[in-house]
Amino acid sequence: MGLGIPLTDSDRWPWLEKLRELLRQSIARKENLVLACSALKQKYRDYLQVSEEISWIYLKGEHQLIAHRLEQRRGHFMNPNLLRDQFETLGEPKGNVVIVDVEADPTTVVQRIRDKLQI
């Protein structure tokens, strides 16, 4: 991604396997875990849904807003030229998902998530 080359499904699966195992271990230990990842496609989210205990939070933002924030980052692996591909690959989650607009500042976004999850 740092080179500006989009990841393929075959690039993503080993990473998703590691995340799935991390989720399983956390659930087995009865630990709370916040796992932040793109999981752009529904099939990725289905694969990661190893338990009904998992809640999905969809941080939704407009392309222009995300592009602006990405341009402000320094030292991040994500090449800004890949953002269009990320949006084209994204299949917005449906069903039991908490949707939070990311236009607000991070503190407000976190509070909205907590409110919706009632924690």
Image: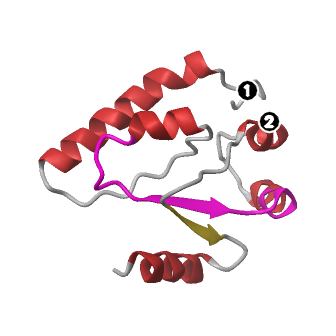
Q: Residue furthest top?
A: 10
Q: Residue furthest right?
A: 64
What's the residue at 49%, 41% (across, down)? 45
Above or below — where is 67 with respect to 102?
above
Q: Is 25 situated left or right of 44 in this image?
A: left
Marks 1 and 2, the one that precedes in the sequence? 1
Q: Is 116 situated left or right of 7 in this image?
A: left
**Where is residue 43 shown, x and y percent of the image?**
53, 32
Where is mark 1, residue-wise? 6
Q: Amino acid at mark 2?
A: Asp
**Where is residue 96 shown, x and y percent of the image?**
48, 59
What's the residue at 14%, 45% (across, down)? 28
**Where is residue 21 shown, x and y percent of the image?**
28, 33
| Secondary structure state at the residue bearing disc 1 | loop
Span colored in magenta: 49-66
C-alpha gap between disc 1 and disc 2:
7 Å
Residue 44 shown in magenta: no
